[in-house]
């Protein structure tokens, strides 16, 4: 694996500036409905636009689909209950419980795969926070005109 150049390097400024104005959309081969697209947008917002690869965008779309399915199955299970009465009158564990569990594990796996959980982003928490802050500041700077003064962030 090649070492990444510092986020403050001029080559990264150009890369971030070029990607800042682009809207990342779900891939055409993974159709998402309106709710799934909202999940997709929030997943994409986890990293600066310049940090996404085409393969990661595909995974983000699958992640969005899984989040939506998890929400739907959880909602249905909440109304039905975790224990259901079957045709012969006996109590049985709701089969949706297994589906919810599987979907939950998929969501966690997608988070790890995309590296949008904190340890995957960078092993050192301080480096992680600083890189993300610098990347977002640069992205916001390229999108805005900076004519309005922004307050300093408290440490």
Image: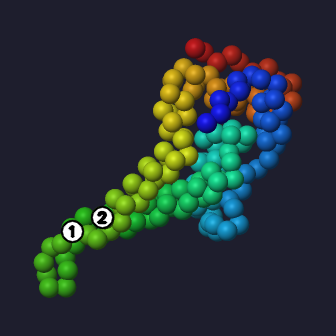
Q: Any mark on residue 97, and which?
A: 2
Do the numbered discs 2 and 1 sit on residues whose CB atoms are within 8 Å? Answer: yes
Residue drawn at point x = 53 percent, y = 56 percent: 63
| Residue closest to the far front | 1
Q: Residues within 10 Å of mark 2 (few under 14, many from 20)?
A: some
The residue that mark 1 highlights is: 93
Image quadrant where residue 133 sits? top right
Please indicate, yes or no, whether residue 143 appears anywhere in the rendered image.
Answer: no
Q: Quadrant of the C terminus?
A: top right
Q: Position of residue 60 (x, y in %)?
A: 59, 54
Q: Disc 2 versus disc 1: distance between alpha carbons?
A: 7 Å
Q: Is residue 114 above or below residue 137?
A: below
| Residue found 65% across the figure and 33% down from its top | 2
Mark 1 neighbour density, 10 Å: few (under 14) some (14–19) many (20 or more): few
Q: Residue furthest top?
A: 155
Does dot 1 land on a helix, a strand or a loop? strand
Quick one: 7 or 37, which is closer to the camera? 7
How far across and down, in percent of the image, does residue 153 sit? 64, 18
């Amino acid at each position: 694996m090649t070492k990444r150049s510092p986020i403050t390097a001029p080559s990264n400024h150009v890369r971030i500036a070029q990607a800042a104005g682009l809207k990342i959309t779900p891939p055409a081969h993974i159709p998402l409905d309106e709710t799934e697209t909202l999940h997709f947008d929030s997943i994409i917002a986890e990293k600066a636009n310049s940090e996404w690869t085409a393969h990661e965008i595909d995974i983000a779309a699958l992640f969005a689909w899984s989040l939506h399915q998890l929400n739907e199955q959880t909602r249905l299970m909440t109304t039905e209950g975790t224990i259901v009465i079957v045709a012969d009158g006996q109590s049985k564990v709701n089969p949706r419980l297994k589906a919810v569990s599987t979907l939950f594990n998929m969501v966690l796996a997608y988070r790890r795969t995309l590296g949008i959980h904190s340890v995957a982003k960078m092993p050192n928490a301080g480096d992680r926070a600083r890189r993300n802050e610098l990347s977002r500041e640069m992205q916001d700077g390229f999108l805005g005109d900076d004519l309005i003064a922004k307050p300093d962030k408290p440490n």
